Image (cartoon, grey):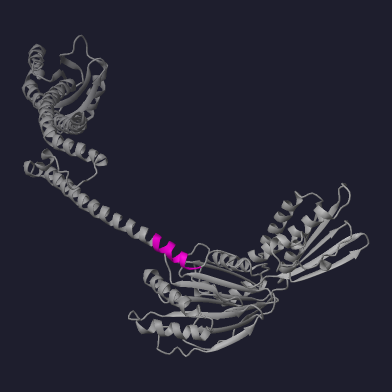
Amino acid sequence: MKTSRLFAKTLMLIVILFGVISTATSILSGWTLYQSLTSEYRSKGIAIAQGIANSSAEILLNRDLATVQSSIDEFTEIGGVGYVFVTDSQGEIVSHTFVPAVPNEVFPIIKQSRASPSSGDVVATTLEIRGSGKFIHIYAPILAGAAGFVHVGMDRAFIQAAIWSTVARQQALLFAIFLVSIVGAYFLVNRISLPLNRLTDYTHSFASQDFDPDVGIPAGIEALPQQSNDEIGQLAESFINMKRRLQRYLSDLRETTAAKERIESELKIAHDIQMSMVPKTFPPFPDRPEFDIYATLVPAREVGGDFYDFFLIDDQRLCFAIGDVSGKGIPASLFMALTKTMFRASGDRRDATADGILFTLNGDIYRDNDSCMFVTMFCGILDIRTGRVDFSNAGHNLPYVVSKGVVTALANPGGMALGVASSANLRAGHIVLGAGDRLVLFTDGVTDAMDESEAFFSQDRLETTLHRGNSQSSRDVVEEVVSEVGRFCAGAPQADDITLVVLGYMGPKEAQQSTVSVQLRNDLSEVQRLSQIVTDFAAQHGLAAELVFRVNLALEEIVTNVISYGYDDRSEHVISVRLSWQDPRIELEVEDDGRPFNPLEAPEPEVEKPLVERPVGGWGIHLTRKMMDHLEYRREGDKNCLVLRTQARES
């Protein structure tokens, strides 16, 4: 099919070329032949006319018309001669070869000949006779026209017939050449198309090949460069070289892709490890309402050099820090992990101070810092009771204090980045945060974030964002700043890690007090319900297990005693129990409408006597006195009111 299409195109090209060549040849040869034959027949006609004129002068003068007629009849047998006639000096036709009569078209010619000057020249012109065709009309004077004129007409149809005959023979020759060309083209096209078809089929199979280096090139394709020492062989050699290069390229690409995937997988694991090294659970200290801390870290790459950390040194002091390692990528992330680990080790001591932590950290980093990397860092310690923050700065961006809508940068106490020199010249500073104030720590990835025109976000924009924010929490502050940076960058690639830590001071912890009241029926099954209420109350306020045990035991003894011995009738009564927690003390109040009974007046059991000699009763009251720190009884109207107080005891 591919050969026939190529052959059809070649045939079409040959036909078009043959048509153009044959048409041009026919036109050119026909025109040349026409000119040649016309000139030839004109010369023949002139010769005939002159011959008759020279031989007929004396005959015409003698008026031997029969001889003239006989003479001109002989010339009609010459090819191309259409007619011959002779006129006398008066213009009368004395002899002619017209059958059956002289056409009217010749008379104007006769008149024209007589009007011509008698110079003896032969005149050639054209004449068209209706029904006979076109002629080359030649007239020659006899004795300079004194004896008349000889008129000869050479038939143009004879000329045209000769031309068409010649053109037909020429076209036959060209057609024979065309057939020979078709046969030659067939063999030539096959010789060219067969290798091309092989190459075409081979290239079509490229899409289904995996270009495995072990898959060779078909023998028929590989032999083409040797079989064809022309452009086809060169094309085949190009395809062979292309496949081999593709095989090498794809083999290298597979290895590169596998290595890239392995690196990406390792970077993903490194990212997860790095993110696991910074606190991500918020709120981190849900039982500490005195402060509100939130942080975020957005690496510019899979891993980065920014970090933050915070932890409680003891119940009253929170240590926090933010840092930025020089450089980016994996080296910075490794240095960050090392720095953060050493920071936690340096700060997790009761005698830790902000400048002392950074001093120790600088010595550890500088000692084995062959890579000459460094880290900027801000460290602070919050006294939760007073809001005082002792801090030290090692070349880091100074945090902002947001207080009642006013944004102020901390004064720089001085100090260079850690790891640069053996002594970082660190100094301490302090501020006191009021209730509601927030400390905003950040890295230069925030202020140096750039938009598409390479303009910086800048500290001015950060201050404006903090000033106009209506944040209700530290998390809101962080999210507002990150969102504003994102809007500013508007799709521009992130150039550096973005890290923010916001610490809000809510004020010292106030004494927490809570109360729960419950109404019980005088039914012993209510004791179990009371025990569950006490357990839930204790869990809500985080009471110690030892304290919960004593409270449950005391209430069980008191309520059981009231239900069992406090009523003389079988009617239903209500016993009211109230629990109040005011850190660190719990108060219990039991009120019933039973007969008057003051447990404080009950005699102490005789614990020294043997068990069989002791009187029944009194042990529950004795146990309650031991469990509680304070008991108080009063009779209000017709009700007994017993108040018990105690607090957690050191084990």
- Using the rendered image of the protein, determine whether residue 243 is visible from the camera's viewpoint: yes
Q: Looking at the image, which is closer to me, 379 or 412?
A: 379
Does residue 583 appear in the picture of this structure?
A: no
Q: Residue at horizontal 62%, vertical 66%?
A: 286
Give the x, y percent position of residue 125. 20, 28
**Residue 342 painted magenta:** no
User: Is the N terminus in the top left, top right, bottom left or bottom right quadrant?
Assistant: top left
| Above or below, comparing residue 611 to residue 572 in the picture | below
Looking at the image, is 74 positioned above or below residue 615? above
Between residue 476 and residue 19, name the one nearer to us: 476
Which residue shows up at 50% across the image and 86% down it? 356
Residue lying farthest to the top in this orientation: 100
Query: Which secondary structure class fits the magenta region best?
Result: helix
Depth order, front residue of 90/390:
390
Residue bounds of the magenta highlight: 268-278
Q: How many marks?
A: 0
**Residue depicted at x 48% and y 83%:** 358
In the visual, does 49 lie left or right of 552?
A: left
Say whether residue 312 is left or right of residue 437: left
Task: Give the quadrant of residue 168.
Answer: top left
- Residue 231 in the image: state x and y as whole percent: 13, 45
Residue 393, image x and y in percent? 52, 84
Tell me: 52 left or right of 550.
Answer: left
Residue pictured at 40% horizontal, 60% vertical = 268
Q: Quadrant of residue 152?
A: top left
Q: Quadrant of the C terminus?
A: bottom right
Q: Is residue 25 above or below residue 79?
A: below
Front in this rendered view, residue 191 or 512: 512
- Residue 567 point in image, percent of width and height: 86, 53
